[in-house]
Image: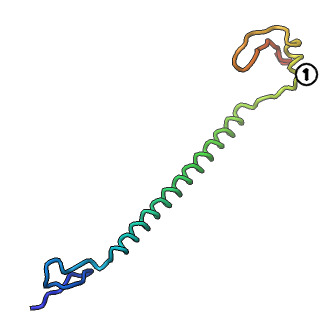
Amino acid sequence: HRCTCLVGFHGDAFTRGGCRSGISFKAKIGIGIASILFGLVVVGVLLCLISRRRKTFNNRRKQNLKALVPLKQYSYAEVKTITKSFAEVVGKGGFGTVYRGTLCDG
């Protein structure tokens, strides 16, 4: 009568608990640590990709908004002329005082 351990196990098949896994405890710890580190690297790469994609999307959105609404910038002298030397105050708020003004084109 011949008793052998299953594939991947070794030891004495005749005794109770004699067949043990072929991987040592230290190897199991090493595999566990390597798996955790690999998982952390994968999560880090995914977070970087998501962050980069979000920044790209926000930049495109800002560019599209600028293309849709071209803003005219006025010099101080132009604003002074438009508001007739800041003659009429319309209101005051968190961003400063608002003056009434009329543009050259109406």
- Label 1, residues with CA under 10 Å away: few <14, some 14-19, many ≥20: few
Residue drawn at (69%, 40%) of the image: 63
Query: Considering depth in this image, is 104 or 3 the residue closer to the camera?
Result: 3
Find the residue positioned furthest to the bottom. 1
Query: Considering depth in this image, is 106 or 74 the residue closer to the camera?
Result: 74
Q: Position of residue 82 (x, y in %)?
A: 86, 16
Q: Does residue 56 sit above or below 21 in this rendering?
A: above
Q: Which residue is mark 1?
A: 77
Residue drawn at (80%, 28%) of the image: 72
Asked which quadrant contains residue 102, the reply is top right
Q: Is residue 11 left or right of residue 84?
A: left
Q: Secondary structure at mark 1?
A: helix
Q: Does residue 75 sit above or below 27 in this rendering?
A: above
Q: Is residue 40 left or right of residue 97?
A: left
Q: Position of residue 44 (x, y in %)?
A: 52, 56
Query: Considering depth in this image, is 19 or 6 the residue closer to the camera?
Result: 19
Q: Position of residue 16 (x, y in %)?
A: 13, 78
Q: Is residue 30 left or right of residue 53?
A: left
Q: Is residue 71 left or right of residue 55?
A: right
Query: Considering depth in this image, is 55 or 5 the residue closer to the camera?
Result: 5
Q: Does residue 98 sit above or below 20 in this rendering?
A: above
Q: Position of residue 86 (x, y in %)?
A: 85, 12
Residue drawn at (81%, 8%) of the image: 88
Residue drawn at (25%, 80%) of the image: 9
